[in-house]
């Protein structure tokens, strides 16, 4: 019974944090016109940093998108490898639109390989060992 209450409280907290990040994204996308991706970052920069840190605005927007996706994956209890691949794809997209630096994508791939390298080898070879 107490475990169910903790799950419900955790779900409510996750939903509150998710709604806060969507509020940040709504603030950033207000009055967006022509070049949508650049305008989002520039508008966010103007409203939050008074036009002084476009890099900081892009990083904060990227972080809010990544955390939103992480919370959705946590709520749905998606498996860890699938969640990691989804996040790497998201980081790749954010790197492509130039909101994140390339080194963050490289770091994410290295961490993914460090965590799941052995598991992926076992899955690909179906548990066969090269040692005889």
Image (tube, rainbow, N blue to C red):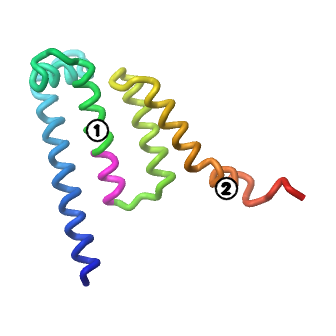
| 34 over 12 or under it: above or below | above
Which residue occupies the foreground of this view, 44 or 30? 44
Between marks 2 and 1, how big is the CA–CA gap? 31 Å
Query: Which region of the structure is painted magenta?
Result: 68-75
Q: Position of residue 83 (x, y in %)?
A: 44, 50
Which residue is denoted by mark 1 in the rendering?
Answer: 65
Label 2 or label 1, whichever comes before in sequence order = 1
Q: Residue at x 36, y 53 (%)?
A: 73
Q: Position of residue 55 (x, y in %)?
A: 27, 20
Q: Residue at x 29, y 44 (%)?
A: 67
Query: Does residue 73 appear to the left or right of 120 in the view shown?
Result: left
Is 69 a magenta residue?
Answer: yes
* Residue 58: quadrant of the picture: top left
Q: Residue at x 20, y 56 (%)?
A: 15
Which residue is denoted by mark 2 in the rendering?
Answer: 123
Query: Does residue 20 appear to the left or right of 130 in the view shown?
Result: left
| Other residues around mark 1 within 10 Å, as few (<14) / some (14–19) / many (≥20) | many
* Residue 74: quadrant of the picture: bottom left
SS category of the residue bearing label 2: helix
* Residue 23: quadrant of the picture: top left
């Amino acid at each position: 019974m107490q475990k169910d209450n903790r799950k419900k409280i955790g779900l409510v907290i996750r939903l509150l944090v998710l709604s806060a990040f969507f509020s940040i994204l709504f603030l950033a996308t207000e009055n967006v016109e022509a070049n949508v991706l650049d305008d989002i970052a520039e508008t966010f920069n103007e409203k939050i940093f008074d036009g002084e840190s476009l890099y900081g605005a892009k990083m904060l927007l990227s972080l809010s998108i990544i955390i939103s996706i992480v919370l959705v994956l946590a709520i749905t209890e998606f498996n860890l490898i699938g969640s990691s691949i989804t996040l790497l794809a998201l980081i790749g997209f954010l790197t492509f639109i130039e909101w994140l630096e390339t080194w963050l994508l490289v770091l994410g791939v290295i961490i993914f390989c460090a965590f799941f390298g052995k598991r992926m080898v076992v899955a690909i070879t179906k548990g066969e060992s090269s040692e005889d």
